[in-house]
Amino acid sequence: MGMTMVEKILARASGRPAVQAGDTVVAKVDMNILIDLMFTQWPDPLSIADAERTAVILDHAVPAPSVVDANAAVLAREFAARFGIERFFDVGRHGICHQVIAENALALPGQVLTCTDSHTCAGGAYNNAARGLGPVEIISILCTGETWYSVAPTIRYELTGAPAPGVTGKDVFLHLAGTWGDATNHTLEFGGPGLASLPMNDRRTIATQGAEVSADFSVFEFDEHCAAYLAEHGAPDSFTPAAPDPDAAYVATRTIDLGALVPYVARPGKVSENALPIPEIEDRAVQQCFIGSCANGQLEDLRIAAEILGGRQVARDVRLIVTPASQQVYRDAVRLGYVQALADAGAVVTNSTCGACFGYHMGVLGAGEVCLTSSTRNFRGRMGSPDAEIYMASTATVASSAVIGRITDPRKALG
């Protein structure tokens, strides 16, 4: 029997000729990522398996908004120095870990990457078996270099067509989540003739959001676009991409016609079976609009927002907060004039951090407020008060809505 992409990656990582859904494997981890939150309860290991396969990224609370976070950063710096970890991304080189992983080509095709952050599946955009695991397991990997997986059945998404203007990767994901719902204990695999029409930033958004339907992995086929992106970001040429076999076994195969999609919005509470085409969403005033996170704080997101907001103003009763996904994205956005355009329109452009996305700092919501976000989650209480409402949409929809003050179809702004 043939193998899916993740089955091939896990077979290689576990030294087995083949694996299939239902198998349990012990896999060698190619890259293990530690983030700042790990160091708030740090066990301080005596030795580690491989400094070359370890990276430390400060992202959730930078610069430190509390003494607890500042102390965690001190421990992270001491740990990186003691074990000679060269891939250490301190404040100034920082960013949301999944963006830093992408910028530094740490998630390579055909390999395994681990991290505590639940959106680690973002690395699947690069044909990598990336998955978020618990902190105890990450410490175990740090010490042994290995972890175990129960191989999940795979759902194949066959992409056809090309997205229309105003439709992005976020809309593709919201369509998927709204139509088919959760994929708990399953792997998502993306490919097909429409893949070439999706730029890498859109693939990153879709792969990242796989966590919101509880997928184990969310992996894209490797192609020339992925190869070009990795080469541009300094990837070595030592990796071996994983392609699915023609007779690979899937628990389901679903086709998405990208050309038939429209902008989508997820209503508050969850995205699974809760996202609708924007013409079907209720008319709703918003008090805060947020563009950012690992899913939609990429340079392309800031370009889209700057293009929509250029020459316009954020509505009087709306706050628009924009958080670049990394310091590198921030620097590029300054150089290209995006930050100027956003600030001139009335937006607040913050330092790169996970802060507002998980309701920690730089954009926490108050009781009774309505937020439209392009970030990763819309759970009750995710971005602050449990009495706030969080709608989720693409960057284009959020930027357009910030101008109007109500949830707005971006195709009207673009038209």
Image: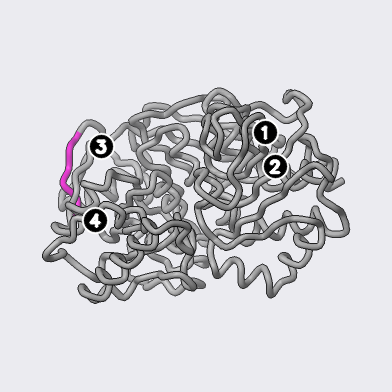
Observer-side mark, 4 or 3, equals 4
The residue drawn where x is 34% and y is 46% is 132
- Residue 24 in magenta stretch: yes
Question: Which residue matches tag 4?
Answer: 42
Q: Nearer the viewer, residue 158 or 414?
A: 414
Observer-side mark, 3 or 2, equals 2
Q: Nearer the viewer, residue 220 or 217?
A: 217
Residue 252 vertical placement versus 90 (above, below): above
Q: Earlier in the sequence, mark 3 or mark 2?
A: 3
The residue drawn where x is 43% and y is 58% is 97
Residue 50 vertical placement versus 191 (above, below): below
Disc 2, disc 1: CB below 8 Å? yes
Query: Mark 2 to mark 4: distance in Å?
Result: 35 Å
SS for callout 1: loop
Say what amino acid the circle numbered 1 marks.
Glu
Q: Earlier in the sequence, mark 2 or mark 4?
A: 4
SS for callout 2: strand
Say what amino acid the circle numbered 2 marks.
Gln
Question: Which residue matches tag 1?
Answer: 369
Q: Nearer the viewer, residue 262 or 227?
A: 262
Q: Is residue 229 visible?
A: yes
Q: Nearer the viewer, residue 27 or 254?
A: 27
Question: Which residue matches tag 3?
Answer: 151
Query: Number of callouts in the render?
Result: 4
Q: Residues within 10 Å of mark 2 (few under 14, many from 20)?
A: many
Q: Is residue 162 visible?
A: no
Q: Earlier in the sequence, mark 2 or mark 1?
A: 2
Bounds of the magenta span?
23-28
Instruction: State which quarter of the image contains the N terminus.
Output: top left
- Residue 288 is labelled as 2
Say what amino acid the circle numbered 3 marks.
Val
